[in-house]
Image: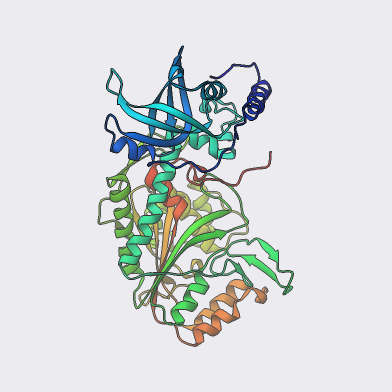
């Protein structure tokens, strides 16, 4: 069925010639609707000898035994073997069959039978060509010199790499389970603008665009938070949004400029209640999608395979205690200059422009976050880091928040949300500095109408899927990740 020319160009030309020959037979090589009696998985599930079935899918294998041929048909749900005897087909059908190639889509009318080895198979009575593939599938995708081709041509990766396909099927199940979990607990799914006049809700570089009709500059959102809080003001007490954010920043193993985020808000709750919710949610996902709270994970490079244990309860510890464990019990008692010197001694590079709280945060990221693999809720972070969270009553220098770390990266932040419009204005003005135009005045006006106390969470879905599936890179869990131009 498949000639073996020396080059891809020759192979493409050979298939184009077959395309012309198929048209010369009076057959449309890109046929339309074909009624099937079920998916291949359905056919396999109800398989019984003598049943007639209509199936459609892609040819993924061919074993030529003269006048008898065995083909594999795959429709994405399962694979099943086809048996074709050219003696049982009309001359027109034989002519068409001889012009088929691997990767072509066909529809078949068949009768179920078992081979001598007991394999469920379909005896083909007629063939309909549904789509002629002009390029073949690579026989050894991972043998390609450019491994990034898996990401650039994801459609081929999905066809020839069952492991890649399974990761994305798990992602789909994870997202579905998140929605069902929250809706079962009374949360309503909402949608907020992706184009915003002020890019707020996080400290990140936005993508900028322009609306020609109304003439304003707009920004792709970096976070939905400020609009979701407007809905709290408007009387929606349990809400979530699961959608895209955009940040005009670097690309790495853990960062993509377009990413999926879950944010949820619960009126009259706090950060502790949100931590409980997230812990329950992630354990539910692990059990439902993976069937276990033990997740095997290989980080990158030469790091050994390790098992992440999601068994509850998860550890909770204050930010200051964790920093002191990593950098010394006197870290917060020494001078700012001494902290810089100790950071350098600990192997943590500190930029000259870092403020003192940023020095501590960088030490935390390098010595705590990147080295923490079992679930850890880091609580009561410095107020400078989270301007939208409520100040802690026990320590005014901190805010009532958690950061959930699993597998060396932040999976979810959660807050007791700040609902004091006066304090919120002060914090946003301090954050904006001279850039007062970056303050969302409409959001502050909404707060002045009264926002209930609430807990809020964010979960990076791509990182969550990485953790639950053991994926090495964010590009392994995004269908079409951003890539450097060729």
Quarter of the image where the C terminus is located: top right
Q: Position of residue 82 (x, y in %)?
A: 40, 26
Q: Position of residue 246 (x, y in %)?
A: 58, 59
Q: Is residue 116 left or right of residue 223?
A: left
Residue sitting at 65 percent across and 42 percent down?
A: 484
Q: Quadrant of residue 264?
A: bottom left
Where residue 211 appears, as percent x and y from the top left, is 71, 69
Answer with left or right where residue 277 lies relative to residue 363: left
Q: Is residue 27 left or right of residue 242?
A: right
* Residue 83 visible from this viewpoint: yes
At 27% from the left and 29% from the top, the residue drawn is 49
> Residue 61 in the image: x percent, y percent?
46, 24
Can residue 387 be seen from the camera position used here? no
The residue lying furthest to the front in this view is 90
Q: Vertical placement of 177 versus 110: above or below?
A: below
**Res 108 → quadrant:** top left
Against 27, residue 291 (above or below) is below
User: Exactly how many numbered labels are in the figure?
Assistant: 0
Q: Nearer the viewer, residue 288 or 208?
A: 288
In this rendering, the answer to whether 168 lies above or below 115 is below
């Amino acid at each position: 069925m498949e000639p073996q020319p020396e080059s891809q160009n020759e192979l493409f030309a050979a298939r184009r010639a077959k395309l012309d020959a198929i048209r010369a037979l009076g057959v449309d090589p890109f046929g339309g609707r074909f009624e099937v009696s079920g998916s291949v998985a359905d056919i396999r599930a109800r398989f019984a000898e003598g049943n007639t079935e209509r199936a459609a899918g892609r040819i993924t294998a061919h074993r030529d035994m003269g006048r008898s041929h065995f083909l594999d048909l795959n429709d994405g749900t399962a694979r099943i073997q086809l048996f074709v005897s050219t003696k049982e087909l009309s001359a027109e059908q034989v002519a068409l069959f001889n012009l088929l190639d691997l990767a072509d889509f066909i529809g078949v009318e068949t009768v179920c039978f078992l081979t001598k080895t007991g394999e469920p198979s379909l005896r083909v009575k007629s063939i309909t060509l549904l789509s002629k593939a002009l390029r073949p599938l690579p026989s050894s995708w991972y043998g390609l010199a450019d491994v990034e081709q898996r990401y650039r041509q994801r459609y081929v990766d999905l066809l020839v790499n069952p492991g890649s396909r399974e990761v994305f099927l798990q992602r789909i199940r994870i997202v579905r389970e998140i929605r069902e979990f929250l809706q079962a607990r009374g949360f309503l799914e909402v949608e907020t603008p992706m184009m915003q006049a002020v890019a707020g809700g996080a400290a990140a570089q936005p993508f900028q665009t322009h609306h020609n009709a109304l003439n304003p500059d707009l920004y792709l959102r970096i976070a939905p938070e400020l609009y979701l809080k407007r809905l709290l003001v408007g009387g929606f007490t349990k809400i979530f949004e699961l959608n895209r954010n955009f940040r005009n920043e670097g690309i790495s193993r853990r960062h993509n400029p377009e990413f999926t985020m879950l944010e949820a808000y619960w009126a009259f709750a706090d950060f502790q209640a949100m931590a409980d919710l997230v812990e329950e949610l992630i354990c539910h996902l692990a059990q439902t999608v993976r069937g276990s709270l033990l997740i095997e994970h290989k980080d990158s490079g030469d790091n050994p395979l390790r098992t992440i244990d999601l068994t509850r309860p998860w550890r909770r510890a204050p930010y200051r205690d964790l920093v002191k464990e990593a950098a010394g019990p006197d870290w917060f008692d020494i001078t700012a200059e001494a902290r810089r010197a100790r950071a350098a001694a600990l192997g943590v590079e500190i930029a000259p422009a870092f403020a003192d709280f940023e020095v501590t945060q960088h030490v935390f990221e390098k010595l705590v976050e990147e080295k923490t693999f079992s679930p850890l809720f880091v609580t009561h972070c410095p107020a400078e880091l989270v301007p939208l969270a409520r100040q802690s009553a026990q320590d005014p220098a901190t805010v009532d928040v958690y950061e959930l770390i699993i597998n060396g990266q932040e999976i979810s932040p959660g807050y007791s949300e700040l609902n004091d419009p006066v304090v919120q204005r002060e914090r946003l003005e301090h954050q904006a500095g001279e850039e007062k135009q970056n303050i969302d005045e409409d959001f502050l006006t909404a707060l002045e109408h009264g926002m209930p106390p609430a807990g809020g969470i964010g979960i990076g879905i791509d990182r969550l899927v990485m953790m639950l599936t053991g994926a090495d890179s964010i590009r392994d869990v995004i269908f079409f990740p951003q890539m450097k131009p060729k």
